[in-house]
Amino acid sequence: MDIVSFLIGMSWMSAFVALLLAFFLLTVETNNKISNRLFAAYLLLFAIDNSGLFINENFIKEHLNLEFFRWTTSSLILPVFYLYIVSVCFTDFRLSPKYLLHLAPFIAENLIFAFRLYFVDDVEKMKFYDHHNQMPEFYSLLSIGAIQVVFYSIAVFSVLRKYRAIYQENYTNPRTSIYKWLIQISTVLFTLYYLSIAKNGLRYADFELLWIWANVVLQFLLLVIICWFVLKALNHPDLFRGIDSKLQLARDILPKETSIAEVKNNKSEAITLQISALKDYMAEKEPFLDPSLTIQELSNQINIPVRDLSVLINHHIDQHFFDFVNEYRIQKAMNILKDQSKSQLTVLEILYEVGFNSKSSFNTSFKKYTNLTPTAYRNDS
């Protein structure tokens, strides 16, 4: 088998697995229909874009308008991926007219092609297709693609940073699998997209064999990633839970003329009493035992407005809500591990008892506060 045949074979497999996963996402019963459909749309667009490597040349020449249109669909891939990321992060996400702005490059490209290609005669179309690598319209497609990679990589990681900040300030469930999944998928995909930009540069250099090998390497990586998507979907169907994007960060609640430093340095007697009451409540009532405790729920329990509670914890106590609650969980776990009468309890039983629901998160948090694993701490006690 020569290198070109190998490349075509891998592109077939990548497209097939992507379509298979898209079909699964579109048909599986779930409450996360929007995010699943957006991810399915991303995979479908990927398969369409990838099909250019294995579509029969004669078929292309008989349907040139379809091939030109296929080129333009590549400008939809990253907008759909961005919307997928937003939909997974935030439960209140809904498709709205404002997102139509993401279609602008796709519409612009098709308007250009309408006047330049779609309605010209077959001779002109064929002439363009045979020399498309030297045509300014094709340069513009590649340029738009490169600009989109830069723009959407910034946009996606900005959304993830916001998600992480809101999560830490308002939620205590130690499951971080959603964030890790989105960070992993975004990092891997955008790394490939930047490599693809570099690969496209070889298209115009006198290194045809190197360009083919670059395609082979990228196709292999894409196939591995698509298979990874499939395994994630099968083994972790619970990844797609989000948070409310309307929640505010504590720094945004403060008056604009008030700095965080001023808040920390000016603790009134009332604030001191609130902190004392909060800590007494945490110690006596142990609300942290609820693994899904949120700042809104704690606010309702102690009758402090959620905005005031957020500022109290995040700035006056100087901890994220996530860390503030987990510290109490770890302290209770330490007490249980030292208690000889409870030595029959396993570490797994203890972590569930104190409000964690993930062994990896419990171990990470425990080591953060004690510099020891739970087992090592128990043995040293």
Image (cartoon, grey):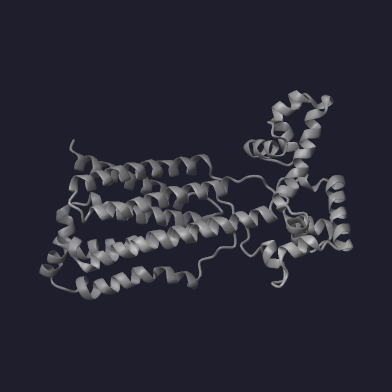
Q: Position of residue 95 (x, y in %)?
A: 50, 66
Q: Is residue 319 visible?
A: yes
Q: Viewer-proximal residue, 195 or 29?
A: 195
Residue at image location 28% in from the left, 67% down from the top: 140
On the rendered structure, is 250 left or right of 74? right
Q: Position of residue 126 (x, y in %)?
A: 13, 64
Q: Position of residue 364 (x, y in %)?
A: 65, 38
In this rendering, the answer to whether 254 lies above or below 207 is below
On the rendered structure, is 167 left or right of 338? left
Q: Which quadrant: the N terminus?
A: top left
Q: Viewer-proximal residue, 374 or 352?
A: 374
Q: Position of residue 280 (x, y in %)?
A: 87, 49
Seen from this angle, which residue lies furthest left?
123
In this rendering, the answer to whether 246 lies above or below 241 is below
Residue at image location 71% in from the left, 31% down from the top: 374
Tell me the quarter of the picture where residue 330 sits.
top right
Residue at image location 30% in from the left, 70% down from the top: 109
